[in-house]
Image (cartoon, rainbow, N blue to C red):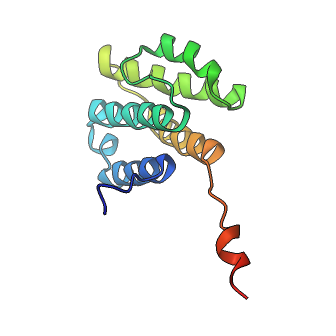
Amino acid sequence: LGDVYKRQPHILAIDRLNQLKSEQLWQSGAFKAYHIQISDIIREYIENRFQIPVKESTTDEIKHLLKRARMQKQMRAEIIESLRISDLVKFAKATPLPEENEHCMDIAFQLIEQTQIVESLTEDTDTDE
């Protein structure tokens, strides 16, 4: 049943973020691995949640594509900022500040918190008399 049942995008993303957080990669100097994973989690969540193909897109392309997603303008800007930090770490071998590493994680959690689809449980509670 596990393979048949597709986990909701927000549950999958939160599980992956918590796993990444527990690995403490950036704290041990593995900035690139940390930012590759954060970027992947954000991109996968956006694809699964909004059906916008962003996994293979550049950050600039994602900036344009995100206009189709129903989310606050400020959140879109934060996501792009987070992806740009990750790009600098991945491609320019930049060393991010601790605050930047934490900010990228915070933005990923905020994205999910603000955009997740929460299924209503009214069916179950109505029949419970």
Residue 55, relative to residue 91: is it above or below? below
User: Residue, x 47% and y 54% (percent of image)?
Assistant: 11
The answer to which image quadrant residue 75 occupies is: top right
Tell me where residue 55 appears, x and y as whole percent.
38, 24
User: Residue, x 69% and y 84% (percent of image)?
Assistant: 128
**Farthest front residue in view:** 127
User: Residue, x 38% and y 56% (percent of image)?
Assistant: 5
> Taking the image as drawn, is residue 77 in sight?
yes
The answer to which image quadrant residue 90 occupies is: top left
Q: Nearer the viewer, residue 62 or 38?
A: 62
The answer to which image quadrant residue 25 occupies is: top left
Q: Nearer the viewer, residue 63 or 122?
A: 122
Q: Nearer the viewer, residue 91 or 3?
A: 3
Direction from residue 25 to residue 78 in the image, left or right: right
Direction from residue 119 to residue 44 in the image, left or right: left
> Taking the image as drawn, is residue 93 in sight?
no
Direction from residue 74 to residue 109 in the image, left or right: left
Residue 28, relative to residue 55: is it above or below? below
Residue 53, relative to residue 110: is it above or below? above
- Pick the quarter of the image with the C terminus: bottom right
User: Residue, x 47% and y 37% (percent of image)?
Assistant: 48
Q: Nearer the viewer, residue 123 or 77?
A: 123
Direction from residue 56 to residue 73 in the image, left or right: right
- Pick the quarter of the image with the N terminus: bottom left
Count of numbered labels shown in the rendering: 0
Tell me where residue 73 appears, x and y as whole percent.
71, 25
